[in-house]
Amino acid sequence: MRSFRTSLSVAAVALAVSLAGCSTAATSSSSTSTSGTSTTSATQQAVTAATIEEDTHYDNDDLTWDASTEVAISLSDGGSKVTSSASTGVAVDGNTVTISAAGTYRLSGSLSDGRIVVAAGDSDTVRIILDGVELGNSTGSPFVVQSADEAIMYLEDGSTNTLSDASSYADQGDDAPNAALYSTADLTIAGPGSLKVTGKYNDGIVSKDGLVLASGNVTVDAADDGIRGKDYTVLLDGAYQVTAGGDGVKADNDADEGRGWLLVSGGSLSVTAGDDGVKAFNTLTVSGGTVNVAKSEEGLEAQHIAISGGNVTVTSNDDGVNASGGASTSSSSGSGGMGGGMAGGMGGGETVGDYSVDVSGGALTINSQGDGLDSNGNASISGGTVVVNGPTNDGNGALDVNGELAVSGGTVAAAGSAGMAVTPGTSSTQSGVQVTFNSSVPAGTPVHIVDSSGAVVATFVTTKTIASLVFSSAAITDGASYTVYTGGTAEATAGLTTGSVDGAKQQGTVTAGQYTQAQGPGGGGGRR
């Protein structure tokens, strides 16, 4: 296995692995794949595909090969055989096909109750092209990589492929396969074709090492976890739709320092999960692409969560974005908000661990029943757009930060209950306003923030009944007075938009930078 950096902290991943817009494509078995590059802001280093090659097992050359060297294997119940370029690296035993040598193997056909086994050497790279393959197994997993340095599953252009395992496995030992696609080696999935994976027993796709999703149109339906890498899970490109009874997509190495991290830098990921949507033990980074967690208990969860690009939408029964878990270096913090109030996690006193949420770009939209954006350590927003449709009960807050919430850029609109409202902290360099309404504002109501000249600075349309709103953007002038209206008109039916106060009801005034707790507009409070 290729070695990679052992220090993948939030800074390393957010800044050094922010592959916004990176894409990988290979159009045929003999084509050369390409990968785009991106340039980050002046405070970040430029990143190319070479960084992924350094930090993971993935290499652009993995998707380039000589078609004349392919070993063609035709699959059929009781009649599987090598049909061209005979290779001593393939053995057929009934409905089990074993590949034991490095090389490129093109599979086609079906096995209703069979298995593909990769049992190659520890230094071997095995590339398997699925070209119209349907695999099922009645006693276990239909596709198992027992040994190799790296396994590459390439989905041929125009092909439709399916893997489906048993609902109960004959071998349920600790080290036995437990997924429809199971690999003990580094695993890459790529190619323009499609793959449907049904994990009836436990997980859908599992790599016990590193996992790179380079491209492909992949659908996973799993009884437990949908897609699971161990050292890391990376989505570079492609469309991945995951339905899981447990966690949707994760990287779960909790034993080795610097591992257990997850990166989405391109493509699209759609998750419906019975537990957490997208999860990493160490760091979870989104630097590009689209992530939609349509259902979850907690939407995004990791010790460190960094969003520097892309479009992230989260719906959760509990916390939307949650920086927690793992070991922590704890202390108590008494940091207050800019203007006081309940900033910094209920005004301080809570344990502040080694956890963080960092939003520097992209768009993050949260719809949570629990806390919206939650960090058991600190949080920072320096760019992008953050919209939180938070809880309606006072036991949770749209923003919940045990330490300091530092806002220095971007646009933030966090709405929800008023009982645990958290506001930007004293280190924030961008001002904002906090509105605590005297009575609840029904879902679908436009809320307008209007400056002293009568110009509408912001319009926010609620998706739930709300009692408070925290808004911060470069359009807000610290110390200036703003009038708050509800009603009127809005261009969109939800979120941040543009609108008019025609027919709206004036609620009162607030002063930028004066954050208070449980006060109506104009109801007092002041800076600390």
Image (spheres, rainbow, N blue to C red):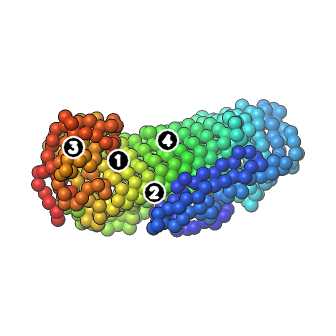
For image coordinates 53% across by 44% down, the residue present is 268
Give the answer, above or below, for where 294 lies relative to 235. Answer: above
Q: Where residue 220 sits in the image (x, y, percent)?
A: 57, 39
For image coordinates 55% across by 50% down, the residue present is 266
Give the answer, above or below, for where 450 lies relative to 40. Answer: above
User: Identity of the amino acid at label 2?
Assistant: Ser
For image coordinates 48% across by 46% down, the residue present is 291
**If you read the primary sequence from the N terminus, does the residue marked by circle 2 or circle 4 appear first?**
4
- Mark 1, residue position: 387
For image coordinates 42% across by 46% down, the residue present is 299
Between 362 and 365, which is closer to the camera in this rendering? 362
- Mark 4, residue position: 271
Look at discs 3 and 1 and give the one toward the viewer.
1
Image marks 3 and 1: residues in contact by CB distance under 8 Å: no
Image marks 4 and 1: residues in contact by CB distance under 8 Å: no
- Mark 3, residue position: 467
